[in-house]
Amino acid sequence: MSLPVIGLPEIAAIATPEVIFGAVKEALIAHAEGRTSVPPPMVLEFPDHAGDCHVKAGHVGGSAHFAVKIASTFASVNNGLILVIDATAGVPAAVLADEGMLTAWRTAAAGALITHAMTPPGIDEVAVLGTGEQALLQVTWLRKLRPINRIRVWGRRPEAAERLCQAFENEGLEARADALEGGGAPCVITTTAARSPLPTEAFRNALHVTGIGTDMPGKHELPVELFADALVVTDDHDQCLHHGDFGNAVRAGIIRPNADHAVGAVLRDGPAVLRDGRPARGTRSPVRSTRSIADLTGVGATDAAVASAVVGNRFSTLVE
């Protein structure tokens, strides 16, 4: 058997934003409805080399494929691959040698989808905490869903924050490295590898916060007090409770462990259902909140959905 190895140039041609957004949204909705198979993720840490490796797997019910993904980050450089397997026979279908980009794109798409859904209409100012690739991608993909005009940036290294501001300005945005000033922006996205909470000043004016970076045990981006009386959505309840910022707030006694909603339910039904008083998971009382928080730890089902879409589109093109 000759197993096709699909490289990044071909993947990039197939995996358009429309394909990625569609696959990620479908997978998150299916996950909220219990129509996925997702085992706990595996994490390997390499502190001597400033690296870690995440192994995730998943399947969306009815999909032609399931997938096992290896995604590594060493010294802030991403890499990886995805093994795509036929879900009817268990036969490997392809290897996606994506160099970690499908993980980056599905993360950006998931963040953009829920940030757009939960941020009130008319808000066009976003603060980004973090200065790496995902900080740029979160804004780039969010702009595909709503107008964004002003970006406020924060990073621990001023020179990195200035470089990110320049990248945003090159895309026609007004960008400033002042995300901590004046209470921050009404929409905040965090994309760091922080192991201690980020400055509270950045969240004082936040109506919505999307946390991206806390994706393994030991990480901690969001101050736990943000969760008090907040409307919280999680991409995977068990993962976010185990190693997300939602779990950090639960262990601090700020929020109950059953007080979250599913991201997929919001993408399916819209946030108005939750804001109008729908009880949170396992509770009887409605949520009353002026702030929403999305805690995203990355779901293997989204990796599988994106990988299956790439393989399906590739093979259908070859047939044509």
Image: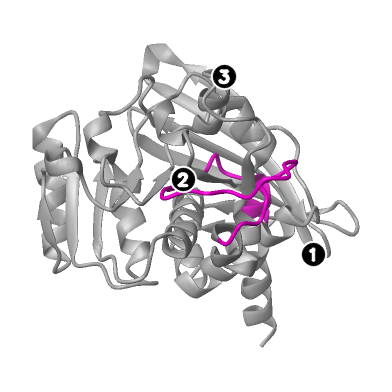
Quadrant of the snapshot with the N terminus: bottom right
Judge the density around disc 1: few (<14), some (14-19), many (≥20) Cα neighbours within 10 Å: some
Q: x and y percent of residue 184 in the render?
A: 20, 45
Q: What residue range appears in magenta? A: 276-304
Q: Earlier in the sequence, mark 1 or mark 2?
A: 1
Which label was assigned to residue 251?
3
Q: Which residue type does callout 1 highlight?
A: Ala
The first of marks 3 and 1 along the sequence is 1
Q: Is residue 307 visible?
A: no
Q: Are marks 1 and 2 in contact (CB under 8 Å)?
A: no
Mark nearer the N terminus (2 vs 3):
3
- Mark 2 residue type: Ile
Tell me the SS state at disc 3.
helix
Disc 3: CA contacts within 10 A as few (<14), some (14-19) or many (>=20): some
Q: Identify the residue position indicated by label 1 in the image.
A: 64
Dot in front, 3 or 1: 3
